[in-house]
Image: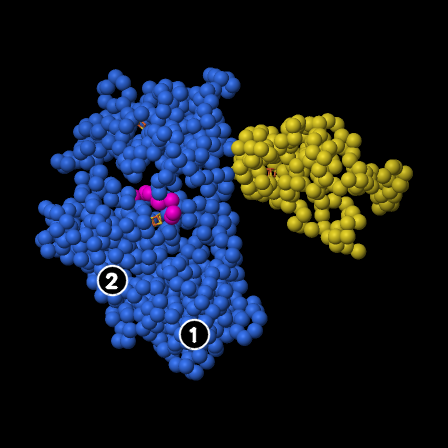
Chain colours: A blue, B yellow
């Protein structure tokens, strides 16, 4: 035995003759993983508590006469674990024979085929033969619709309880139960009610086999058809990491990707099933110029020139301050930065925004709390309902803080009384205040109460749109330049720009679409129809496309490269998952080209990586964000 | 030198006297050995349901990646295949195929087999990407050699019993073959007219 130096908190476990040092309290399963020894598991899951019901992970430990579950046994100092003995091999074979006893073996029609733990382990450790005729299998219900999102095949279930435990431990909703006993046990919805949860889409990923599957992904592809691109969820600004799985030119599913600091491995259903939006049929595919006549498709360079000429004539006729620029929170940081450069440095207008509502009185305290730090707060106040409605995965983090760390989470209305707020945080030395950006003012008042109580207070503000935070950080605002440097002259905010379009105060509008936040809250069609010149960069046929004089095709978030900043300030990378079917450069290139045609003194870089370099120089807090770190405006005091 | 010249003349004379070994292809065709691996056939059950369940195992097994399958869920009232899943699109790029037969080995339902047709000629490349209509045994009186040939064109050669599942190949559906004629038909489609 090799002699390994010991430290008080570390113990040494010998796995298949290999000593590894692990902290006290480590499970044998994790110690094996650390030793590089694979142990097959079904019921064990990194994010769930151990139950040891499937018996797949049994290993030999020391001199114990019986095999022990690696997933639920805590390692002790000097423990000797053996995973490759004949006893273990024989047991695994027997266990798999049991699991396959009534398994329908319909891998060819099962959506999980190709990425299924039962297939993999049966191939690796299984007996490779059966002792019963296939006709003697006990059958259960197939293709049971648990909701419009999830399909359950009761025959394929291996009763690992992961799905029921997920509902107990991760969401707390308890919508799935185990019914009946023995061979008749099945997973079923509680009282037969359809699932209501916002987090059902995680079930098929939690299930180790093909018992729970996505209705949306049903029969659409095989794992070997898919190309996987790590990216960021476009659903909201919470910043969940995910994998975009594409087949040919189509996005077929979003799969979660575990980022413990942000999503902890989970996605909400709005985010996960939003993948269909990236395959919209009403795409804008070629540049079109409709100035004073019927629309003509042309090469993008000519369209940019036409746009620049038209814009220049508006500027010379009416002046620079009659031009407005409207971005969208769906833009990447690079696009937002180049767009504000185009507006301020080239066109020279103060009217720049990306949303409807004004964003004033910024304090760095609004972004001081990180998602991971929520679990370290003694008391957490969630102000208003919008925050959790906008970023649902936040709810899971709050539940985890409550359940695992015993934190106090209170949901409070915006108009909570000072006394009541003080009572809820009584005795807490660290307080987290979470709100939607629409409730910023109220959250500031609640935070002030907490500060008065002597606690250290951190605030998390959920912004609108996947890159709402980045657009603000990088100066797509009428009152702040990149890095929240106040502008000398405050321009019109989003709603003011649209009203200006109708009143004639704004003569030319350069708009990037789609902008769901603006479309929902304003009569975009009226404003777009009224303005003299509208130049639109948009991937879909939205209101901007309908009324634009010059249309340039944009890209969806799955088609572009760059970075987006989540609400907590984490700068994360999005990558090209599908190549757009358009012969046009990315938005950064289009905006830089427009700038060049308008006679920019200094050309803008056209590659997103080069723009990011400029951002890091221009905005100090972005300098330290490489590798998906948070842009810090203020730490938890 | 004289001897060599005579030898050559003798060979020529012998050939002139013998019967020609060429045949008038495609009007005449030779029988194909029973286990030849020619153009693929997708089979049906006797009740008319397609055997293919759209599992994509053939596509996964194919060493050149020339099979494209898109599956969909069966409508229980009008199923295309038994069970939950069927192939709504099934395409084989016959120009890229190396006729190895791995797809037939991978198929769990013996839905795909290799037929006896070895002629892979057309005036357009796109038409050698066989679609499901081309591959499926579809209409009554289907024979392996008539697959891919419009009715009345191309005489099927007399065949020994074809190999593979589902033989004799007779499908119940009285559907017109959605097939492209290999031999130019008077269809009016310029693609069907051989270059002058
Ligand atoms: S449905 Fe899946 S996760 Fe749930 S018990 Fe069965 S196998 Fe486990
Ligand atoms: S919380 Fe937001 S970022 Fe996370 S999965 Fe849902 S929509 Fe996407
Ligand atoms: S015969 Fe071989 S190359 Fe041709 S489709 Fe089948 S597997 Fe692919
Ligand atoms: S031909 Fe066979 S292997 Fe290919 S998709 Fe159909 S059933 Fe599956
Ligand atoms: S994984 Fe250990 S018993 Fe299931």
Q: Position of residue A167 (x, y in %)?
A: 31, 35
Image quarter of the C terminus of chain A: bottom left
**Relative to A628, is A487 above or below?**
below
**Picture residue at 32% right of the left edge, 43% below the top:** A265
Q: Which residues are magenta?
A: A264-271
Asked whether residue A410 is in view, the answer is yes
Magenta run includes residue A267: yes
Q: Chain of mark 2?
A: A
Rendering quarter of residue A322: bottom left
The numbered mark, 1 or 2, whose residue comes first in the sequence reads: 1
**Picture residue at 47% right of the left edge, 36% below the top:** A111
Q: How far separated are the C-alphas under marks 1 and 2?
A: 33 Å
Asked whether residue B62 is in view, the answer is no
Rendering quarter of residue A562: bottom left
Q: Residue A593 — which label? A: none
Disc 1 is placed on an element classified as strand
**Relative to A398, is A45 above or below?**
above
Q: Identify residue for label 2.
A: A621
Label 2 Cα neighbours within 10 Å, binned few <14 / some 14-19 / many ≥20: some
Q: Identify residue for label 1.
A: A508
Q: Position of residue A603 (x, y in %)?
A: 39, 73
Disc 2 is placed on an element classified as helix
Q: Chain of mark 1?
A: A
């Amino acid at each position: 035995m090799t002699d390994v130096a010991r430290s008080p908190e570390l113990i040494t476990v010998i796995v298949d003759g290999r000593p590894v040092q692990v902290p006290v309290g480590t499970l044998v399963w994790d110690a094996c993983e650390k030793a590089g020894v694979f142990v097959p598991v079904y019921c064990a899951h990194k994010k769930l508590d151990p139950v040891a019901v499937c018996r797949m992970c049994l290993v030999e430990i020391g001199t114990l006469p019986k095999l022990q579950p690696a997933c639920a046994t805590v390692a002790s100092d000097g423990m000797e674990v053996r995973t490759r003995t004949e006893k273990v091999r024989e047991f695994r074979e027997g266990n798999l024979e049991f699991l396959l006893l009534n398994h329908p073996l319909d891998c060819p029609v099962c959506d999980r085929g190709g990425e299924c733990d039962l297939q993999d382990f049966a191939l690796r450790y299984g007996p490779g033969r059966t002792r019963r005729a296939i006709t003697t299998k006990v059958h259960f219900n197939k293709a049971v619709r648990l909701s419009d999102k999830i399909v359950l095949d009761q025959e394929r279930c291996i009763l690992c309880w992961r799905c029921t435990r997920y509902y107990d431990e991760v969401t707390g909703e308890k919508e799935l139960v185990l019914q009946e006993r023995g061979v008749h046990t099945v997973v079923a919805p509680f009282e037969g009610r359809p699932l209501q949860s916002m987090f059902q889409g995680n079930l098929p990923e939690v299930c180790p086999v093909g018992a729970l599957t996505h209705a949306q992904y049903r029969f659409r592809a095989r794992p070997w058809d898919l190309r996987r691109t790590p990216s960021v969820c476009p659903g909201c600004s919470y910043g969940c990491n995910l994998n975009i799985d594409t087949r040919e030119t189509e996005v077929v599913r979003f799969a979660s990707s575990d980022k413990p600091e942000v999503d902890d491995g989970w996605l909400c259903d709005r985010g996960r099933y939003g993948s269909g939006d990236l395959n919209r049929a009403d795409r804008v595919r070629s540049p079109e110029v409709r100035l004073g006549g019927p629309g003509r498709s042309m090469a993008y360079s000519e369209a940019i020139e036409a746009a620049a000429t038209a814009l220049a004539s508006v500027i010379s006729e009416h002046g620079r301050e009659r031009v407005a620029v409207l971005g969208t929170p769906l833009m990447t940081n690079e696009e937002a930065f180049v767009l504000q450069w185009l507006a301020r440095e080239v066109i020279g207008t103060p009217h720049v925004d990306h949303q409807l509502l004004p964003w004033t009185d910024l304090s760095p305290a609004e972004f001081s709390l990180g998602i991971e730090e929520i679990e370290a707060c003694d008391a957490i106040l969630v102000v208003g309902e919008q925050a959790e409605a906008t970023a649902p995965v936040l709810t899971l983090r709050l539940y985890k803080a409550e359940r695992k760390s015993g934190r106090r989470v209170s949901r409070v209305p915006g108009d909570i009384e000072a006394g009541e707020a003080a009572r809820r945080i009584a005795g807490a030395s660290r307080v987290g205040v979470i709100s939607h950006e629409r409730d910023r003012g109220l959250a500031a008042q609640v935070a002030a109460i907490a500060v008065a109580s002597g606690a250290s207070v951190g605030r998390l503000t959920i912004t609108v749109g996947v890159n709402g935070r980045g657009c603000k950080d990088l100066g797509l605002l009428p009152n702040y330049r990149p890095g929240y440097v106040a502008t000398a002259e405050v321009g019109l905010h989003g709603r003011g720009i649209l009203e200006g379009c109708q009143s004639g105060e704004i003569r030319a509008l350069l708009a990037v679409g789609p902008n769901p936040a603006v479309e929902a809250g304003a009569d975009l069609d009226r404003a777009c129809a009224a303005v003299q010149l509208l130049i639109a960069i948009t991937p879909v046929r939205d209101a901007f496309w309908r009324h634009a004089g010059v249309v340039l095709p944009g890209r969806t978030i799955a088609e572009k490269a760059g970075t987006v900043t989540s609400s907590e300030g984490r700068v994360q990378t999005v990558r090209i998952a599908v190549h757009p079917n358009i012969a046009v450069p990315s938005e950064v290139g289009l905006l830089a080209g427009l700038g060049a045609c308008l006679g920019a003194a200094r050309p803008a870089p056209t590659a997103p990586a080069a723009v990011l370099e400029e951002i890091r120089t221009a905005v100090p807090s972005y300098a330290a964000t490489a590798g998906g770190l948070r842009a810090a405006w203020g730490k938890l005091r | 030198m004289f001897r060599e010249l005579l030898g050559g003349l003798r060979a020529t004379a012998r050939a002139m006297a013998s019967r020609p070994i060429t045949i008038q292809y495609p009007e005449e065709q030779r029988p194909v050995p029973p286990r030849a691996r020619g153009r693929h056939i997708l089979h049906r059950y006797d009740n008319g349901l397609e055997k293919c369940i759209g599992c994509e195992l053939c596509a996964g097994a194919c060493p050149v990646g020339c099979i494209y399958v898109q599956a969909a869920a069966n409508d229980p009232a009008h199923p295309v295949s038994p069970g939950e899943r069927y192939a709504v699109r099934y395409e084989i790029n016959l120009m890229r195929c190396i006729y190895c037969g791995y797809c037939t080995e991978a198929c769990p339902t013996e839905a795909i087999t290799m037929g006896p047709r070895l002629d892979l000629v057309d005036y357009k490349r796109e038409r050698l990407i066989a679609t499901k209509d081309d591959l499926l045994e579809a209409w009554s009186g289907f024979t392996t050699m008539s697959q891919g040939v419009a009715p009345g064109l191309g005489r099927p050669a007399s065949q020994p019993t074809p190999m593979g599942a589902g033989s004799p190949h007779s499908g119940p559906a009285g559907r017109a073959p959605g097939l492209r004629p290999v031999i130019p038909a008077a269809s009016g489609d310029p693609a069907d007219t051989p270059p002058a």
